[in-house]
Amino acid sequence: MTPLPDSYCPSDGTRVPAGTLVWCCPLCRGPLDLDFVPTPAPLKSLGGRVNSLWRYAETLPLASPTTTLGEGRTPLVELRDGISAKLDFLMPTLSFKDRGAVLLAELALRLEPRQVIADSSGNAGTAIAAYCARARLPCTVYVPEGTSAKKLEQIQAHGARVNVVGGDRAATAAAAREAADVPGTFYASHVYNPYFLHGTKTYVHELWEDMGGRLPDVIVVPVGNGTLLLGAALAVAELHSAGLIDRRPALYAVQAAAVAPLAHAWAEGATDLTGSAPPPASPTLAEGIAIPDPPRARQILRAVRDSGGTFLTVTEDQIRHAQSDLASQGLYVESTGVACWAAVREGAVLGARTAVVPLCGAGLKTGLASATVPTSPA
């Protein structure tokens, strides 16, 4: 079995040896990154490989998966000239979170914890629950009040225990982090655990392969905790360093205007949320990206800036209209998952540049966006 790489804190450089259940920096309690710089395989060598994200084995920190459900390799379809959508809602648990969850489950199998816990507004929780079920690992998922009933049903269907936390998404994360310090616990955090980012990066490796060894001018991603964006930045860096692309696409980060701390910090020219006081969060249909204080804020802002990208925000009306528009094209996507299309569908933001948007979650998870906004943010 290939040895696991060590982790390190991107803020203060503290190193964490592989093979432990330590889930954050022992000094600053911040999220960890992985000491792993792979070289992706050239395009011509990918033919005939397994038709899942595991075809990019050279870029993944784990090998020989036992919990795979065939995740990855989702279709790329054109929405209009120059803009395509990657249908990541066509995953085993109906969201892109499967990309990272499968790596967390594989890692947990190797570390043999007594229990696995996760926190989520829904999609990450359903993905972790499903892959823990596949791995025969006991799992508890912490969720905020107001989480979609269908997402709760899906988590429980996979045999996970649901712990509903009074309060918002931040309160839920705080409760899970306290539980994560119990000995023998594997914290399957899609925010703190860097293995999750190395799963989400396969989104861009697939784009690169399906576009014949190139990438669009702009990669548009929804941002709450930033796991898809940071994964995309990892993949772009890997492909560029290997000489497999000659230019880096701009990263456009999309937030709901109701909960947009990163967009606010960006507009203020800040490099972190510290010292930047965003307006109070309001209720939003985009529950999956309603994150008022993302732990990787500094990394997200730097990744967007380094790419030459920007932040965009969308209103609740834009979300409703985008969901209806996609449904009229045969694509039934949850309200969070339509945020990127809401941001660019009018075309003025992109101009003549090509772009890909992710459709991250299935509409069956939340139903159609109602005429009224939820009473509290998830």
Image: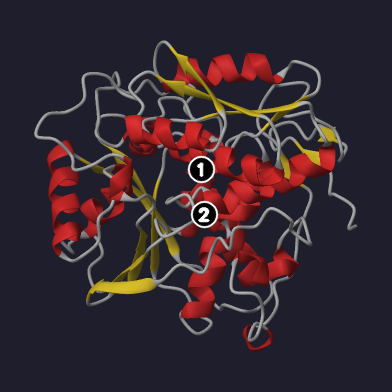
Task: Work out whether 27 lies above or below 300.
Answer: above
Specify the label residue 306 is tagged with. Answer: 2
For marks 2 and 1, give the one nearer the viewer.
Answer: 1
Specify the label residue 68 is tagged with. Answer: none
Residue located at (74% from left, 56% from top): 66
Residue located at (33% from left, 29% from top): 149
Residue sticking out furthest to the bottom: 44
Depth order, front residue of 284/119: 119
Q: Which three-letter amino acid code belongs to the residue tagged 1?
A: Ile
Q: Which three-letter amino acid code belongs to the residue tagged 2?
A: Asp
Task: Work out whether 237 lies above or below 192.
Answer: below
Which quadrant: the N terminus?
bottom right
Depth order, front residue of 137/23: 137
Quadrant of residue 185 in the image?
top right
**Label 2's element?**
helix
Quadrant of residue 357 in the image?
bottom left
**Label 1's element?**
helix
Residue sticking out furthest to the top: 166
Residue 97, given in percent of the width and then of the height, sits at 51, 47
- Taking 215 as reference, is 312 left or right? left
Disc 2 to disc 1, C-alpha distance? 10 Å
Residue sticking out furthest to the left: 371
Depth order, front residue of 61/352: 61
Which quadrant: the C terminus?
top left
Q: Which residue is mark 1?
A: 300
Residue 70, given in percent of the width and then of the height, sits at 58, 63
Residue 367, given in percent of the width and then of the height, sits at 23, 42
Q: Work out whether residue 80 can be spotted.
A: yes
Residue located at (38% from left, 63% from top): 87
- Taking 348 as reference, is 188 left or right? right
